[in-house]
Image (tube, rainbow, N blue to C red):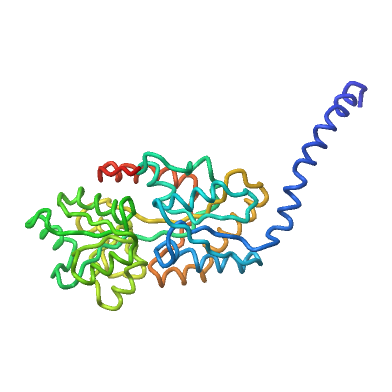
């Protein structure tokens, strides 16, 4: 080695040592991660569609990591309160967020102002699950198919009502897109969550409801509600005899709710990698698939960042169709 090359090498050594030193704390953290319980923020109340997915998943993730992953329900503002709290949390990997199609793709088009940026404020980790929106009716309506629903709505325009878990939810927007695609008018009645909407549907106050399948499936199985169709591209394994909207009345119709795990922005790379690997391994496991299948939910294994971009465009169009904006 000549003298010039030797001098250049010596000049590079301090910078290299500094880079290694800078990485050392993160590497040590990753190697010992996790050393305490993790918190998973669910931005909706207990018992709702997101909570139903998050709780069994958190249990499996905790077992896999060797530390408890406990649920922290922080509802309000269409998931914005929970999302904002995670965005402001330490990016050490101990606070996770069960993001939804609402918090990640719908809210940017729906709200004029948000307390978080769904891209800049989060580290996307991995997708978890998806579920179709189910179109259900009270059996007393005498509506037995999607074609029946469309025919009755056309014969009696703007008289049938459909409920959803709230303004801007997947159920609300799927209903709006269904009405647009079928050329019908149904009056939307927003509720504060799925439970009160189901109660009114059972009581006959409203005639139709659009909601993620796992929320209404127990009532369908008990014979208290009738399911007409699902909004996924393919039939749901939990109700394989029920047709999709696309095969029945509106070709190419697809509006699916989904869930994914995020962390705050600027998480350590090694911690991020550990969590991504664990989540992806779990969502591919037969145990997870069996557990979800019983609830009408399917594991989802697609690149999260790309999904979020595509779904933001799709659901943004749905928001514009609905004409809804919120403060």
Residue at 85% across, 25% down: 8
Say which of 216 and 249 sits in front: 216
Q: Which quadrant would residue 257 be assigned to in this image?
A: bottom left
* Left or right of 67, for residue 251: left
Q: Quadrant of the N terminus?
A: top right
- Where residue 171 sits in the image (x, y, percent)? 30, 56
* Left or right of 297, for residue 303: right
- Where residue 223 sits in the image (x, y, percent)? 25, 77
Residue at 43% across, 54% down: 100
Residue at 30% across, 66% down: 196
Q: Residue furthest left?
A: 155
* Left or right of 226, for residue 264: right
Say which of 52 and 317 sits in front: 52
- Where residue 129 sits in the image (x, y, percent)? 45, 60
- Where residue 222 sits in the image (x, y, percent)? 29, 78
Q: Residue furthest top?
A: 4
9 over 234 or under it: above or below: above
Q: Quadrant of the C terminus?
A: top left
Q: Which quadrant would residue 292 be assigned to in this image?
A: bottom left
């Amino acid at each position: 080695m000549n003298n010039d090359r030797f001098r250049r090498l010596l000049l590079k050594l301090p910078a290299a040592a500094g880079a290694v030193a800078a990485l050392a704390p993160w590497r040590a953290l990753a190697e010992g991660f996790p050393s305490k319980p993790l918190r998973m923020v669910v931005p909706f109340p207990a018992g709702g569609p997101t909570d139903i997915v998050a709780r069994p998943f958190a249990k499996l993730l905790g077992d896999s990591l060797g530390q408890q992953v406990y649920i922290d329900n922080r509802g309000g503002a269409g998931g914005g309160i929970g999302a904002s709290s995670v965005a402001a949390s330490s990016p050490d990997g101990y606070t996770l967020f069960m993001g939804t199609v609402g918090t990640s793709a719908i809210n940017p088009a729906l709200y004029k102002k948000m307390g978080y940026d769904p891209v800049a404020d989060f580290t996307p980790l991995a997708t978890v699950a998806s579920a179709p929106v189910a179109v259900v009716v009270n059996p007393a309506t005498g509506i037995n198919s999607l074609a029946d629903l469309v025919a009755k709505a056309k014969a009696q325009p703007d008289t049938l009502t459909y409920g959803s878990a709230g303004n801007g939810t997947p159920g609300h927007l799927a209903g709006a897109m269904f009405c647009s695609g079928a050329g019908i008018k149904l009056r939307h009645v927003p509720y504060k969550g799925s439970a009160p909407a189901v109660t009114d549907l059972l009581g006959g106050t409203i005639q139709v409801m659009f909601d993620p399948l796992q929320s209404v499936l127990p009532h369908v199985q008990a014979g208290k509600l009738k399911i007409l169709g699902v909004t996924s591209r393919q039939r749901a394994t939990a109700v394989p005899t029920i047709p999709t909207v696309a095969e029945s009345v509106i070709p190419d119709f697809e509006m699916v709710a989904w869930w994914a795990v995020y962390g705050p922005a600027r998480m350590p790379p090694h911690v991020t990698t550990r969590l991504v690997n664990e989540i992806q391994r779990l969502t591919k496991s037969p145990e997870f698939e069996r557990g979800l299948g019983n609830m009408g939910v399917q594991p989802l294994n697609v690149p999260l960042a790309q999904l979020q971009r595509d779904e933001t465009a799709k659901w943004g169009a749905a928001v514009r169709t609905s004409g809804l904006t919120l403060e």
